Image (spheres, rainbow, N blue to C red):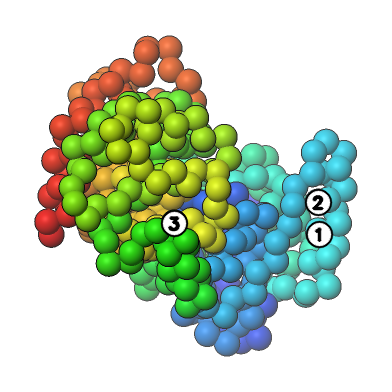
Amino acid sequence: MENPTVSTVAKKKVNKRILIVAPNWIGDAVLSLPVVDGCAQFWPEADLTVLARAGVATLFEARESALRIIEYRKGNGFRRIGSLFGLGWRLRREQFNLALLLPNSLSSAMVAWLAGVPERLGYSTDGRGWLLTHRLPDRRKERGLHQVDYYLGLLRSAGVSQVDRIPKLQLKEKCIEMGLTLLSNIGVDKRELIIGVHPGAAYGETKRWFPERFGAVLEQLQKSGRRFLLLGGPGEELIAQQISMVMDHPPIDLVGQTTLTEALALVSMCSLFLSNDSGLMHVAAALNIPQVALFGSTDPQKTAPLNDRAVVIHPEQISCTPCFERSCPEDLECMKAIAVDEVVTAAEQLLTL
């Protein structure tokens, strides 16, 4: 059966109640911001609501925008099934008439279907095509397709073509004030040159450069007036400790000690951000912070930071990268190929701009 045309969605510009189902990871959520902003620009009179899981919702709540955010939590096993039905029935009361499904999951389409949304637009992935009224073919394996363009494909298929593809994260004033307070509490003057570092990556070891090399980079960047902030989530504390152990003057270690809102605020205060391919990498890009981004098992063509002040380091000479594996059978050759001096040079160049 031929898929119903999706271009008709764009023609219905009046009285829209639009539900945008957000991705489940911080980095992906950042890359979905052009979709959110594109909807707001194309349907300026529409009521826009973002549905996001706990944690990710914080990113949208910290933005300077009038969006409504609905937060949900995922259950496990039978609880997950129950929570899906409960969420669907909860959303049914909202009477949305269009749902944009950014995750590829069956569950996101199921929720929109249970919510009774008459137009459900998404990629036909994970066997969920029957739940969509407007289905797009799976493009995940398309070479050179950046994730932001994958998401924007939904809008473009609906006839919304004039969209800025660069994610922008303008934080609320109270979030900025929170960052200034945090800096004061840890003894950092906002006039100092702050270098933020996220040495972790939730995905796995293949996205994490070695702690001792991060430490070596920071040692070489040590100069009067430069302060280093280590950021990261729970479970990454050991990485930060390993960095501090190899440094004569340890950085300020905030790993596992901040909320996401606080981390967003602190990243916005940085003059440079150094990280692996991670969610905070994309946060820094959306804040237009100069950055050095290190890639191992993943592909910069798909997830590079969209920031004209970013230097991406990816050892293309290693034949097995990108492999997208979480663990490595080849002794992390891609990460070994990233030299300390290369990272230091990139960082110093950005700091002189």
Between 139 and 252, the one lying in front of the other is: 252
Residue visible at 13% across and 41% down? 345
> Which residue is under mark 2?
84
Query: Disc 1 to disc 3, how far (Cα)?
Result: 44 Å
Query: Disc 2 to disc 3, how far (Cα)?
Result: 42 Å
Check disc 2: other Cα within 10 Å, few if <14, some if 14-19, many if 20+.
Answer: many
> Which residue is under mark 1?
88
42 sits to left or right of 291: right
93 sits to left or right of 27: right
Query: Disc 1 to disc 2, how far (Cα)?
Result: 6 Å
Rendered position, 48 above or below 237:
below
Residue visible at 20% across and 28% down? 339
Considering the numbered disc 3 on the image, is that residue within a helix, a strand or a loop? loop
Between 321 and 252, the one lying in front of the other is: 252
* x and y percentages locating residue 260 in the rendered image: 55, 55
| First reached walking from the N terminus: tag 2 or tag 3 | 2
Query: Taking the image as drawn, is residue 4 in sight?
Result: no
Considering the numbered disc 1 on the image, is that residue within a helix, a strand or a loop? helix
* x and y percentages locating residue 103 in the rendered image: 59, 50
Rendered position, 157 above or below 298:
below
Disc 1 to disc 2: CB gap under 8 Å: yes
Considering the numbered disc 2 on the image, is that residue within a helix, a strand or a loop? helix
Check disc 3: other Cα within 10 Å, few if <14, some if 14-19, many if 20+.
Answer: few
Give me the disc on residue 186.
3
- Amino acid at circle 3: Ile
- Amino acid at circle 2: Leu
